[in-house]
Amino acid sequence: MSTHEPAVLVLEDGRVMHGDRYGAVGVTFGEAVFSTGMSGYQETLTDPSYDRQVVIMTAPHIGNTGVNDDDPESSRIWVAGYVVRDPARISSNWRATRDLATVLEEQGIVGISGIDTRALTRHLRERGAMRVGIFSGPESQVSTDDLLAQVLASPGMLGADLTSEVSAQESYVIPAVGERRFSVAAVDLGIKSMTPVMMAERGIEVHVVPASTTADEILALQPDGVFFSNGPGDPATADAAVETMQAMLAARMPVFGICFGNQVLGRALGLGTYKLRYGHRGINQPVQDLRTGKVEITAHNHGFAVDAPRDGDFDTPYGRAQVSHVCLNDDVVEGLRCLEVPAFSVQYHPEAAAGPHDSAYLFDEFIALMDANRKVRA
C-alpha cells in the first residue's frame, strides 16, 4: 500500500500535484503518459517499451491482484515512475505472491498515489505528453520552482535512442512447442516475453537476437522469417534497425514487425515518422483492418506513428505497399503491408498477455507468409 509520506508530481508546463509516496523514496524523471487499462498492470510495468516513461494509470484502483512470477514481460520493471490514485490495501488473487507496492520499492521505482489520475489524464490529452518529475523524501520539500527547473533540465522523448538500453546483450533460443515447423530470427528492440512464446506455441523455433546483430549474421541463421519487435524511443534514431530491415526486404525474407518494428518497416520503405500528441496506450484501442472491415480491440504502447498515404497503394523502393490498418479513434496508421515482397507490420501488440486477444491471428498470417515463401523457393 501507499504510505503517508509526502510526494510531489511536477509537469513541465508547471502543473503540480501533491500525494503520497508509492514505491521507492527518491526522484525520477520521464515522459508522462497515461494507460487506460483497468487490468494488466504487471504487463505494463515490465514492458521494455515503457523505458524512460512515467505511467499514469487512469483507472482509479490499481494493485488489487498483486504480483506473481508468471506474468512479467521481462526480467525487470522498466517504467521510470508510476502514478496511481487508489492503491489496493491488500492483494486478492490466488496467483499473487506479493503486493505491488513492495515490488516497486524493491526495484527502486519511484511513484506517487492519492492524486486524481483522471484529471491528470485529461490534462495530458489536452496538452500532450510531456516531461514530468516525481519527488519523494527530502526532495519533496524543495521549492516548486526548483523542482520544475529539474524537470525542464531532464531529457525528452523526441530524439531518444533507447534500443541499446533494453535489447538483450546475447542471443537466446525459445524452442518450438511440439513439431518444429519454422525458424524465426526475432530482432530484440525491446521484445516482450510473450511474443516468442506465442510463436513457439505455433511450432516456431525463435532465435532472439540483440538489436546490434547484423543482417549477415541474421541471414547466417537461415531463418524462415525475421520478426522485428516492439521497443521504446524515437524511431527516427533507429538507423541500424532500418538498414537491417532493408537488407531483409532486399533478400525477400518474410518479415513481420510490431509497434517499433512497424515504424522501422515504415522508415525502410521510405516513409517518415512523427510524434503523436499523447500516444496510444492501454488495452482498449479500436483498430480496423482495411481489407476486411473488421474492427479489433487491441493493446497499444506507442508515442510515435508512421506517416503514410491512407488511400490506395503507394510506391516504395521494394515495390507497392499499402496501409492495412487504421485506428478508429484518430485515423493513425496501425499497419503496413508490402505487395511485392513478403513483409507486413502492425503498430499494436498482438501478443498482449493480459488481453485483448483479437489480433493473435497475425502470428498465423506470419506463418502463412513463411510457408508461401518456402514453397516459392523450393
Image (cartoon, rainbow, N blue to C red):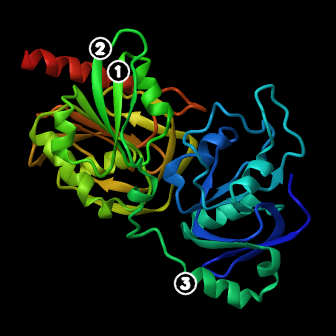
Provide the secondary structure element on which disc 1 rests: strand
Q: Looking at the image, which is closer to me, 289 or 344?
A: 344
Residue at (45% x, 58% y) in the render: 165
Q: How far is mark 1 from mark 2, CA to CA?
A: 6 Å
Q: Which residue is mark 2?
A: 181
Local crowd at mark 1 within 10 Å, few (<14), some, or many (≥20)? many
Q: Quadrant of the C terminus?
A: top left
Q: Along the polypeptide, which appears first: circle 1 or circle 2? A: 2
Counting from the top left corner in percent of width and height, residue 66 is at 78, 38
Counting from the top left corner in percent of width and height, residue 143 is at 77, 89
Counting from the top left corner in percent of width and height, residue 302 is at 46, 52
- The kind of residue tagged 3 is Ala
Q: Along the polypeptide, which appears first: circle 1 or circle 3? A: 3
Provide the secondary structure element on which disc 3 rests: helix
Q: Which residue is mark 3?
A: 153
Q: Is residue 292 left or right of residue 108?
A: left
Query: Is any part of residue 109 visible from this angle?
Result: yes
Q: Is residue 356 left or right of residue 374?
A: right
Q: How far is mark 3 from mark 2, CA to CA?
A: 51 Å
Q: How far is mark 1 from mark 3, CA to CA?
A: 46 Å
Q: Looking at the image, which is closer to me, 292 or 46?
A: 46
Q: Along the polypeptide, which appears first: circle 3 or circle 2? A: 3
The label on residue 204 is 1
Residue at (83% x, 52% y) in the render: 86
